[in-house]
Image (cartoon, coloured by chain):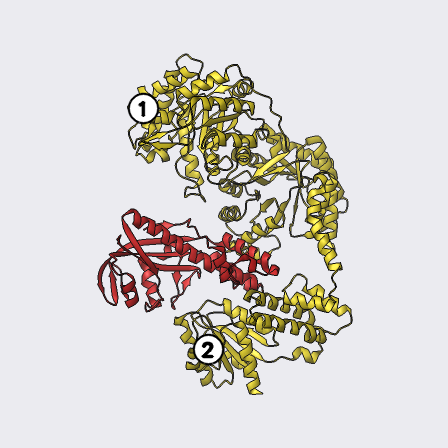
Amino acid sequence: MPIITDLRAAPRLNQVYSRMGFKPAKADIPESMLAMVDEAIQLGKALAEPKACYQYFPIMRTEPNMIEIEGQFVIQSAKVYDWMAGCQGLYIGAVTLGPELDQTVAEMMADNYVTKGFLVNAYGAQAAEAAMVELNHIITQETETNGFATSKRYSPGYGDWAISAQKDVLQAINAAQIGISLTDNYLMIPEKSVSAIIGMRPQR
Amino acid sequence: MLTRQEFRNRANREIILLDGGLGTLLQQRDLAIGQAPEELNLRKPESVIRAHRDFIAAGSQVILTNTFGGTRIKLDEYHLGDKARNINSLAVELARKAAGNADVWVAGCIGPCGKYLKPVGKLDFRPAYETFSEQVRYLAGAGVDLLIIETMSDIRETRAAMMAARRYFNGPIIAQMTFADGRNTVTGTDPLTALTVMEALDADAFGINCSTGPEEIFSAIKEVQNKTLLPLSVEPNAGMPRIEEGRTCFPASPEHLAEYAVKFVDAGVTIIGACCGAGPSHIKAMATALKGMKPVHRQILRCRSRLASRNRTIEICNDRPIRIIGERINPTGRKKLRKELGDGVFHIVRRDAIEQVRAGADILDVNVGVPGIDELEIMRAAIQVVQKAVGAPISIDSTNPDAIEIALEEIEGKPLINSVTADESKMDRILALAKRFGAAVLGLTLDDNGIPGSAEGRLELARKIVNRGMSIGLRHEDIFIDPLTLAVGAEPERSLESLKTLRMVKEQLGVCTVMGISNVSYGLPNRSLINRTFLSMALQSGLDLPIINPFSETSMQTIAAANVLLNRDHGAKLFIDQFVAFTEEKAEAAADTRSVDEQLFDAILYGNRDAIVQRIDDVLATGRDALGVNEKILIPALQEVGRRYERKQFFLPQVILAAETMQDAFKRLKDLFPAAEQAQSRGTIVLATVKGDVHDIGKNIVSTILQNYGFKVIDLGKNVDSRDIVKIADKVKANFVGLSALMTTTMVEMGRVIKDLGEAGIKTKVIVGGAVVSKDFAADIGADGYGKDAMEAVRIIDLLLDDKA
């Protein structure tokens, strides 16, 4: 199963600014905060160690509210069923930025640098999304090379797909190998982690 | 046998013509698709001989063996790894056969192994070093005259190849890298950095090959032509390859390359050949054009020494600004850092690296000496972390030769080893490491008898280290000396001896000097005054590289001024740039027409944490009492922040920053409040992120903001058990309990806490919040209030308080 240890995670700056609570354009950031925002982004970049793992699974059987994946598990969700219409298999993937960023944010907060911690955390959240976008891109390229197309991606906890499915999803690709674990309440550790499925269907 | 001296003499006095692209020539003539060119050594030796002979006939004075991809790792791609010995030995034989009696040198050719080293790729240093060592042994054993390492683009891989070549071959070595756009290799190394690293590893010539064509190589060679005494070599491609009718074509004509060959000689290059796409006709045209040409004299701009990271070279020169070694990554006296290193955690290291460079450090000292830890592995990881975070060269700070060696394996550029002493038991080993890994080394003027009291005694030890280093082949410029400082409070005469040693080392040995400054003030009050005074005295006495804390503004300002006074900052340009802004700021402050009250108000409003304590003291100096300052300035400022946020004139981070600043302000004022006021509070709030949930960023923000509204906030943290919340709420007689949860799976826990509080009979109001929590949900579980963000939480609590009243 492919592991990517040098994944690119390059969030768009306007999205990072939005996530930090500003308007998207840099010009909108108040002057008194510009230096701190730049510093938080630089620190966030240095702290993030984006990794990913993913694998392809054929779909064995579908019914209007469920999809069975070969050798793995059953997805109970009408939404996912609709989303994956026409797909003959799906990719499961997960990305993480690793523990360093979370730890640093927690430490900054404990040291009473709450704003700085908040900004670095916001960068991390957007970078984790960007890492998933990159993984999606890699998977799409791989499928297109083989003459297939991909669906949009979908994650446990969206719509009617229970968050508890996170456990099956991470287990199927052994996400522990890139350092992702799950709490009893289905929170991913490190926090800056994203998991998803992406369907594969013949090109129209 | 060709000696290194003979090679250098000839390369300095004549133009030496290499061959062209052997691989592409074989490809055009005899190679099947998917076949390794090196396989022809076994299968079609006659075609390899023919290609060599064609180049010799065209005028090549040096031919390169057909072993560009001859490392075992590279040959494994073609399942030929087991034939590595044959392929390399045969290649040398074939070249010799082709040369016959002609006056031609046979150069063993070494190309990349096909895998990048960490962190660019996945290969570790040792296997890379081993694969190159194997190839070098075969080539040397078969009797090559010299070695050419070429087309390298990863500086760590080039280091591995160069070290292997020096270890197993006594003759001349040419080291060449390829710069994609003429400025950097694809992994980010610039020509000067490549030169710096190869020079330190004792290459006999430095060069550039392949790339996109002669134009780009020309611009890259310009970067280094006056920076080294080594001969320079180039082998350009015949332009950028194009695919035409299914065949790879190289656009540059023989005449084009010949024209450039002349330009290269004019730029100081003496070893010239060509690379991919250049056949015998190109070499012939070059030979004709170069006929009768002699090397030009190069004006070399010497600097005292250089250190490098992967992508940056720091030049240490007498007429350039003083370079600074940042001392912060050192666990001595830093409890938190010591604990982290013990736990194998590196975020302080990473942050210190980034922030020291931002504060102006040019080189970073890395010391991980904590008793009882695995220094080797921690050192390895720390070097990786620092190299990833910043582009500053590293000073490897350890007394343990094994830890130094591990660090040297991880290094991407040319580091400084800090340090070696004149103590016989370790001196030779550390000097040998510096030589082998191409590092500079810092000698301390002490031996097993300690630090000599007199400057003369220290100078003798310095001389011993310099002489010993040079006797094993270290370059004079790569040996630095630290005359050592001791606490002047304890031994008053000794700081003078340190300064005297600096002067003597400079005058008599002429090497780079390094000195840690902060020791001098140990045990005295106002240390920074002593430090910066000593610093300026040391700079005047010949100190090149101070080791200081770059966060010390006074030290950094002293250096800025010293740069001007020692004529290292021409026209005081840097100084003016730095301090005009500073003076303007001052002038602005002086011209500030705002009253001190207004300035304090603005400091809260705009979250100026650096200035807040000063602003408060300014206001207190006017005779105002603390309580009045709080009620008339601080609280209204905070209210203004809230108003602006509601009007969407302020963003959330500004609110948090203002709240943090308010806390600093409050800390300053609190002790000045009358005792009765100190105890006063609007109520006690217990905050917690509920059991099962670890996302507490939002709760932390609520906590920060509530503290500024006169509440006593007890923050229990995250993942807090319901029983603990009940227990504490009871104990502190909490007026409010605030709960947060981010997830649908954990928000139900909030209902449980409310139920438990009720059952325990605790009279408190509960407010809830968190990403997925809604007003309806809050009502369902029986919460008294719901806040969608921190500001709303404050408002809700105010409302609930009014209710009670």
Q: Nearer the viewer, residue B643 or B441?
A: B643
Q: Residue at x 65, y 80 (%)?
A: B680
Classify mark 2: helix, strand or loop.
helix
Whole-percent x and y of residue B370?
56, 51
Residue A134 visible in the current orientation: yes
- Mark 1: amino acid: Arg
CA separation in Å, label 1 and label 2: 82 Å
Q: Amino acid at mark 2?
A: Arg
Q: Name the residue: 32% across, 65% down.
A: A165
Pick the front one: B395 or B617: B617
Question: Which residue is disc 1 drawn over?
Answer: B29
- Residues at discs 1 and 2 both on one chain: yes
Q: Mark 1 vs mark 2: give the one in front.
A: 1
Q: Earlier in the sequence, mark 1 or mark 2?
A: 1
Q: Quadrant of the C terminus of chain B?
A: bottom right
Q: Is residue A21 above or below residue B643?
A: above
User: Would residue A98 be visible to someone looking at this image?
Assistant: no
Write down which chain is painted yellow: B
Dividing the picture into quarters, in which one does residue A179 lie?
A: bottom left
Q: Tell me the residue at 65%/37% (across/down).
A: B481
Residue that numbered label 2 is attached to: B723
- Residue B150 point in image, percent of width and height: 45, 30
User: Pointer 2: residues within 10 angstroms few (<14), some, or many (20+)?
Assistant: few
Colour red, chain: A
Label 1: state its secondary structure.
helix
